[in-house]
């Protein structure tokens, strides 16, 4: 395993002994793992398993109680935040503004002043940049795509996606999976937290199973839903 | 993009959102209007009495109305957890803070511009002192309210009862500024004494709390 204290570490992300406590509840209980570049990881587990907390910790949104995160060889997550794209379960978009207006604003946060980049990522998720309708009037599927477009704005090396397929129809979800495969092909490392793991069967490079705040298994294939990782250990 | 450019982009975004939703300005106006009308029914002062009490009435009305706007500015960042998009970006926290404070300053100034004529009519006000100092007091006083208000509204953002928490935090710390605003306004309206001391106090208060807010906002933004 990569030593998180070693800045020359080869893994794009290495985490060691991550503990996250909310009051008396432990959302993460000593998670240690490393993830290599250019792979698509599906993070699976029941509700409350710690998937979202792990993703938020990697995004720098949830300060840890204990443990170390090393991203691109750096411990200071603020210094690598422009290399990370984060898509949360909520859209992280202003309902009163159009998709283009939203992206134009968020692009400024990354120092991008070129509207062409915003239009390109909107087209990449198969939406129309000319759409003037406010995001609040989008369908759930469109909102999810626009949210993905926002996460792609800064052309990140690492994509953290929390439930990108929830409330999305099957056709749109498959299109999103196709998009993720293309991005993985271009060298991005992608983490997808999902309850619809079957969508990533044969696509994800690894399925990371979480339970009660710990990674309990990592498998190259998706196992049927009745598979219980702890029983196989 | 420079920090100034980012502040401008965030301010424009906030003004656009407010223009479309009218969340803050409508509730502020309605609230302030109610205060003016209720106070005018409650008291029936002579012109001289009005000059003595108007400073207090005006600023209390603006303070209460500003709280409505202050709660709204951050509330819209909580919808769809949009604030997280800012938190994961490399954008400096102070750009967000300054944009929010400037936005609130504009909203409260618009409110003051609309409500002041009503106060003048309802309370038959005429300044006996140097009236040119009133805009200075208004600008300094409004900034004192919004800079603290923006900071404490951000602090109370993740609390369960943030709409109660904000006044609980804001009002006690605003007492020196409120005192200075009321005294300065009263002195200008009555012409009995100089407002200079109170204006200097407001300047000092504004500088101190602007610096403190800018220094501490990063911790507030990135706290869970």
Image: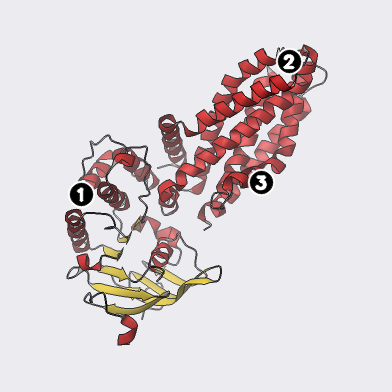
**Colour convention of the picture:** secondary structure
Question: Of circles 2 and 3, which is in front?
Answer: 3
Question: Which numbered marker is on residue A124?
Answer: 1
Q: Residue at x 27, y 45 (%)?
A: A139
Q: Secondary structure at mark 1?
A: helix
Query: What residue do we see at 50% from left, 38% from top?
Result: B99
Q: Give the quarter of the image for residue B126.
A: top right
Tell me the number on the disc at residue B169.
Answer: 3
Q: Is residue A8 above or below residue B125?
A: below
Tell me which chain the residue with mark 2 is part of: B
Left or right: B220 with respect to A114?
right
Same chain for the residues at labels 1 and 2, yes or no? no
Residue A180 image point, x, y percent:
22, 60
Residue tagged 2 = B130
C-alpha span from label 2 to label 3: 34 Å
- The residue carrying pointer 3 sits among few (fewer than 14), some (14 to 19) or many (20 or more) residues within 10 Å by Cα, namely some
The one nearer the camera, A131 or A63, is A131
Q: Is residue B121 left or right of residue A184?
A: right
Q: Residue at x 57, y 36 (%)?
A: B68
C-alpha span from label 3 to label 1? 46 Å
Q: Nearer the viewer, residue A89 or B216?
A: A89
Determine whether A176 is above or below A68 in the image: above
* Subunit under mark 1: A
Contact (Cβ within 8 Å) of mark 1 with mark 2: no
């Amino acid at each position: 395993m990569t030593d998180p204290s070693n800045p020359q570490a080869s893994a794009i992300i290495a985490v060691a002994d991550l503990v996250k406590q909310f009051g008396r509840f432990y959302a993460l209980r000593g998670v240690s793992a490393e993830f290599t570049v250019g792979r698509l990881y599906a993070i699976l587990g029941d509700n409350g398993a710690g998937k979202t907390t792990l993703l938020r910790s990697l995004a720098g949104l949830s300060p840890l109680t204990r443990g170390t995160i090393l991203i691109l060889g750096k411990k200071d997550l603020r210094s690598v935040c422009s290399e990370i794209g984060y898509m949360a379960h909520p859209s992280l978009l202003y309902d009163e503004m159009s998709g283009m207006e939203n992206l134009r604003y968020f692009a400024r946060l990354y120092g991008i002043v070129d509207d062409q980049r915003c239009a390109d990522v909107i087209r990449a998720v198969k939406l129309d940049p000319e759409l003037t309708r406010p995001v609040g009037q989008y369908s759930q599927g469109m909102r999810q795509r626009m949210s993905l477009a926002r996460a792609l704005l800064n052309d990140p090396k690492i994509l953290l996606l929390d439930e990108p397929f929830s409330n999305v129809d099957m056709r749109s979800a498959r299109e999103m999976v196709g998009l993720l495969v293309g991005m993985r092909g271009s060298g991005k490392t992608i983490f997808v937290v999902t309850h619809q793991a079957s969508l990533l069967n044969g696509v994800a490079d690894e399925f990371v199973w979480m339970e009660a705040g710990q990674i309990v298994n990592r498998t190259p294939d998706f196992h049927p839903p009745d598979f219980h990782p702890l029983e196989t250990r | 993009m420079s920090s100034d450019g980012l502040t401008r982009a965030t301010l424009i975004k906030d003004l656009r959102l407010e223009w479309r939703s009218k969340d803050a300005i409508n509730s502020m106006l309605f609230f302030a209007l109610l205060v003016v009308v209720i106070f005018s029914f409650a008291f029936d002062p002579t012109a001289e009495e009005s000059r003595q009490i108007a400073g207090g009435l005006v600023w209390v009305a603006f303070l209460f109305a500003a709280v409505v706007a202050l709660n709204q500015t951050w509330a819209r960042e909580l919808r769809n957890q949009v604030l997280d998009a800012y938190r994961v970006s490399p954008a400096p926290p102070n750009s967000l803070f300054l944009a929010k404070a400037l936005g609130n300053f504009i909203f409260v100034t618009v409110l003051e511009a609309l409500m002041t004529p009503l106060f003048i009519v309802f309370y038959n006000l005429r300044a006996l002192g140097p009236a040119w100092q009133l805009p200075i007091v208004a600008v300094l006083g409004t900034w004192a309210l919004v800079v603290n208000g923006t900071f404490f509204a951000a602090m109370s953002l993740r609390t369960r009862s943030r709409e109660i928490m904000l006044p609980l935090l804001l009002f006690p710390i605003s007492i020196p500024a409120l005192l200075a605003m009321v005294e300065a306004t009263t002195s200008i309206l009555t012409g009995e004494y100089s407002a200079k001391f109170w204006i200097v106090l407001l300047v000092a208060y504004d500088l101190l709390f602007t610096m403190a807010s800018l220094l501490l906002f990063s911790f507030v933004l990135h706290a869970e």
